[in-house]
């Protein structure tokens, strides 16, 4: 009996020991060590856009209407006023200590980053510096902020910049959101294609992908150029220089944007060529070539359209905005009637675009009323 | 049973965990490559610093740059390994000749033949990545059956083999254009970074997840209760047989004690308990290995990769002159993955903790030093961001060169490099510890495999001797 109990006890002990050791041990990868879930679409990188999507609405090319002339702006001040008498907008800028400027950094020779000197440089950059010189007496009182074509208006709207000098074409649609100075440069839309690829006219690009910067006027113009099924296919990338990379990689067949920017691209790649205005002969008679015009203006943030403002506050802000616009126009007019505009042209654009024509102030008899003289425009 | 558990334990050591370690190293090398490529655009400022330097200082600067990330030719007289400056400040440690299973560069690595030394930090990182990919092929051999298993590890390796050269090509295109001062260079750099973060690292993530699952499976195989059950059945059955034999002999001979049978019973009991103890010890050792080494190792590896990605985003953001929303968003996302906010404070503990905060919880001894370097890196970054967002007002006649200062501050800060170096060291020590624990655990199971057959033979011999003697005595 005792022996049986002893045996039973031993067997039970062994069973308990075994049961205790029966559970297997896993070793899953700890959750924090697992790869992060994919980023949400909103934070994903700037991926090439599809031809079917225009992204943020591209502004419609302007046609002068009785109520809107895209080139029109307020008359300049008779003279630059002394400090403390320049209006509340300018006073605020002076208190900040810097003129905050949105610029493009991938649109040489108008705006680009020189990684050797760590300086932004270009025609637009120096225009901004001239405005800063007028404000502060020093051209280096500028805080530059790079901006993509599609974000120029929102940069001003969000109060992140005082002005945008970024190859920004003046359009009536954009005038509803920002204020513009008078025209400081008359550019025109052109097309960049691989040299010796048989592309000489716009009609040669029928059915081909033509790239423009997202949010640019060029995008819509390409879409409107040719009627019918054999039109070029407009596609977009974030910036014009992204279009250049796409062209170099064979993802698109042409780049359409301002001649100024394309000329700069052409200097970066000898295998490309810039089509002149005659390339549009098949789709645009000479008398309609005005639609290709891209008049540049300095965009200025509006401060009178905040929904929280009372009518009197909005009116006061509008006055302040007007004063600032007129101040900028004074600076621009001085540049164009003096030697400065030509100096900048010679420095940045002569080697790329050839000899300068008349500055915009000479193409409008009463600049900046927007009325071109008979020989005005491009 | 014993063979199965030994095999499973060895598989953890030589296959699944080994492959996981190599996959983590691959992921880190590729992240390093991305960071060094992003730093490339600033390489020129090393050669042409804005401050005034004498001719001899400039020559010294130039010689230093030859060992760094700017020049891509074969300058064999340069010392091997990463130097200081833009490339090294991206957090690159040259891993020339690093073999499988190692994470930190050893003395032997830094003394590699200068003729084989990569010319710059990006090349070093890419070489490390491609070498590691080859190591991974050896650790996990097999063919890709794309039609049946497109997400298999072998197919991921094949994809990586085609994608990495594409990244190299884009970076080369970027460098050539940057050198010529062409604005399109920045686009190619962004394309390269997009390829890395959006596609290439996805493949390495797939590998890490797959190998992590294999380690889990092998652990379960190595510690499955089937072994103990089988042992209990075998030894229990033998014990019952012996007791039955003892009863039978007692009835035939009227003698209670039969030395042979008693000896056999004792041998079986002792060996049986011993085997159970060994199996339990093996399981315990594996659990300890998992808790003390495997978990910290994987958390550190994940932290390292995420930190390198954060560094890449930091540099891309700096390059963007305030237009870096995409890079800023990427930086915040990766920092969340680490478990920290941009201010350097740990995020509130809700849901899954970040990789670094979880690693620090596992490594209390290293917490202070790791946290110090990491938070200092973030503090410097914050200062740079604040300065770019709101530059200091000019005092006197000079206007501060904010952008120049921002780049200089970012690239010259050593906190990130020191943080990564510490992580590398801790990772290697944990990997070595894990390896040692697995070897001990495998040894314990092998002992069981030797003990059981010996015990059964001895017990059988004792039985034969005991019963035989009685049979002869009582005929």
Image: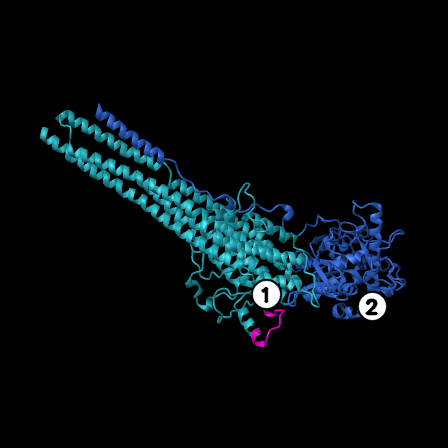
Chain colours: A blue, B cyan
Check disc 1: other Cα within 10 Å, few if <14, some if 14-19, many if 20+: many
- In the displayed structure, A10 sits above or below A375; it is above
View extreme (top): residue: A1
- In the image, is A335 to the left or to the right of B447? right
Classify residue A92 by image quadrant.
bottom right
Q: In the rendered image, is residue B192 in sight?
A: no
Residue drawn at x 57%, y 52% is B197
* Label annotation for residue A14: none
Residue sitting nearer the eye, B235 or B379: B379
What x and y, as percent, mark residue A80?
A: 84, 64
Q: In the rendered image, is residue A328 in sight?
A: yes
What x and y, as percent, mark residue A330?
A: 84, 63
Which residue has dot 1 on it? Answer: B43
Classify residue B232 by image quadrant.
top left
Specify the quadrant that holds the N terminus of chain A: top left
Chain for mark 1? B
What x and y, as percent, mark residue B49?
A: 61, 69
Range drawn in magenta: B47-57
Classify residue B38 by image quadrant.
bottom right
Residue sitting nearer the eye, B435 or B143: B435
Specify the quadrant that holds the C terminus of chain A: bottom right
- In the displayed structure, B113 sits above or below A71; it is below
The magenta stretch spans residue B192: no
* Label annotation for residue A357: 2
Query: How far apart in space, not on screen, are marks 2 and 1 (Cα)?
Result: 39 Å
- In the image, is A25 to the left or to the right of B164? left
């Amino acid at each position: 009996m005792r022996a049986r109990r002893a045996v039973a006890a031993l067997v039970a002990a062994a069973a308990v020991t075994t049961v205790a050791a029966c559970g297997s041990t896993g070793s899953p990868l700890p959750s924090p060590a697992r790869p992060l879930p994919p980023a949400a679409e909103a934070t994903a990188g700037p991926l090439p856009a599809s031809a079917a999507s225009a992204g943020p609405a591209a502004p419609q090319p302007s046609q002068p209407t009785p109520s809107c002339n895209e080139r029109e702006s307020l008359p300049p001040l008779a003279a630059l006023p002394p400090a403390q008498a320049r209006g509340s907008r300018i006073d605020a800028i002076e208190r900040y200590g810097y003129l905050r400027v949105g610029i493009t950094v991938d649109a040489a020779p108008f705006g680009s980053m020189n990684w050797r000197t760590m300086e932004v440089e270009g025609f637009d950059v120096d225009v901004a510096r001239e405005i800063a010189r007028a404000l502060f007496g020093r051209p280096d009182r500028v805080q530059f902020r790079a901006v993509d074509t599609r974000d120029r208006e929102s940069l001003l709207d969000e109060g992140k910049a005082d002005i945008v000098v970024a190859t920004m074409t003046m359009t009536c649609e954009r005038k509803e959101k920002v204020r513009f100075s008078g025209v400081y440069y008359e550019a025109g839309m052109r097309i960049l294609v691989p040299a010796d690829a048989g592309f000489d006219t716009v009609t040669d690009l029928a059915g081909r992908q033509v790239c423009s910067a997202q949010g640019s006027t060029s995008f819509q113009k390409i879409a409107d150029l040719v009627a019918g099924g054999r039109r070029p296919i407009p596609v977009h990338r974030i910036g014009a220089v992204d279009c250049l990379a796409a062209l170099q990689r064979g993802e698109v067949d042409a780049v359409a944007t301002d001649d100024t920017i394309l000329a700069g691209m052409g200097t970066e790649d000898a295998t490309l060529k810039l089509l002149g205005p005659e390339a549009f002969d098949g789709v645009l008679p000479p008398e309609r070539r005005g639609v290709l015009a891209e008049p540049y203006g300095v965009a200025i943030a509006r401060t009178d359209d905040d929904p929280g403002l009372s009518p009197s506050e909005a009116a006061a802000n509008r006055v302040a905005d007007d004063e600032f616009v007129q101040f900028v126009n004074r600076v621009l007019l001085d540049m164009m009637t003096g030697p400065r505009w030509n100096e900048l042209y010679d420095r940045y654009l002569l080697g790329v675009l050839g000899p300068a024509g008349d500055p915009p102030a000479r193409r409008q008899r009463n600049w900046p009323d927007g009325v071109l003289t008979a020989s005005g425009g491009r | 049973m014993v063979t199965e558990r030994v095999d499973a334990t060895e598989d953890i050591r030589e296959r699944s965990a080994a492959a996981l370690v190599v996959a983590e190293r691959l992921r880190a090398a590729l992240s390093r490559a991305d960071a060094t490529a992003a730093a490339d655009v600033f390489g020129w400022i090393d050669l042409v610093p804005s401050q005034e330097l004498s001719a001899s200082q400039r020559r010294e600067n130039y010689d230093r740059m030859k060992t760094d990330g700017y020049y891509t030719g074969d300058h064999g007289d340069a010392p091997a390994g990463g130097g200081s400056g833009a490339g090294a400040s991206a957090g690159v440690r040259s891993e020339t000749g690093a073999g499988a299973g190692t994470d930190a560069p050893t003395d032997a690595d830094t003394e590699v033949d200068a003729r084989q030394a990569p010319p710059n930090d990006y090349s070093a990182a890419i070489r490390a990545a491609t070498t590691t990919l080859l190591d991974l092929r050896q650790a996990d051999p097999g063919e890709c059956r794309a039609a049946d298993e497109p997400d298999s590890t072998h197919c991921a390796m094949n994809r990586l083999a085609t994608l990495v050269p594409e990244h190299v090509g884009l970076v080369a295109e970027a460098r050539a254009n940057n050198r010529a001062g062409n604005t399109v260079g920045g686009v190619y750099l962004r394309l390269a970074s997009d390829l890395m973060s959006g596609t290439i690292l996805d493949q390495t993530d797939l590998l890490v997840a797959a190998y992590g699952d294999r380690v889990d499976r092998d652990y379960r195989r190595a510690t499955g209760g089937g072994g103990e059950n089988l042992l209990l059945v075998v030894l229990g059955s033998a014990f019952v047989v012996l007791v039955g034999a003892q009863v039978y002999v007692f009835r035939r001979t009227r003698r209670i004690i039969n030395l042979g049978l008693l000896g056999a019973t004792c041998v079986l009991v002792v060996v049986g308990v011993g085997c159970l103890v060994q199996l339990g010890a093996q399981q315990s050792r594996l659990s300890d290995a998992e808790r003390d080494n495997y978990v910290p190792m994987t958390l550190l590896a994940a932290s390292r990769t995420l930190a390198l990605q954060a560094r890449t985003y930091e540099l891309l953001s700096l390059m963007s002159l305030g237009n870096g929303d995409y890079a800023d968003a990427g930086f915040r996302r990766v920092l969340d993955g680490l478990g920290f906010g941009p201010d350097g404070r740990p995020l509130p503990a809700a849901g899954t903790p970040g990789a670094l905060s979880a690693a620090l919880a596992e490594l209390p001894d290293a917490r202070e030093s790791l946290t110090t370097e990491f938070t200092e890196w973030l503090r410097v970054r914050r200062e740079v961001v604040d300065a770019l967002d709101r530059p200091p007002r000019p005092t006197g006649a000079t206007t501060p060169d904010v952008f120049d200062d921002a780049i200089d501050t970012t690239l010259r800060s050593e906190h990130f490099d020191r943080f990564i170096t510490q992580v590398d060291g801790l990772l290697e020590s944990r990997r070595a510890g894990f390896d040692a624990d697995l070897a001990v655990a495998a040894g314990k199971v092998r002992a069981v495999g030797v003990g059981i057959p010996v015990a059964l033979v001895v017990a059988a011999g004792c039985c034969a001797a005991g019963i035989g003697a009685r049979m002869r005595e009582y005929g």
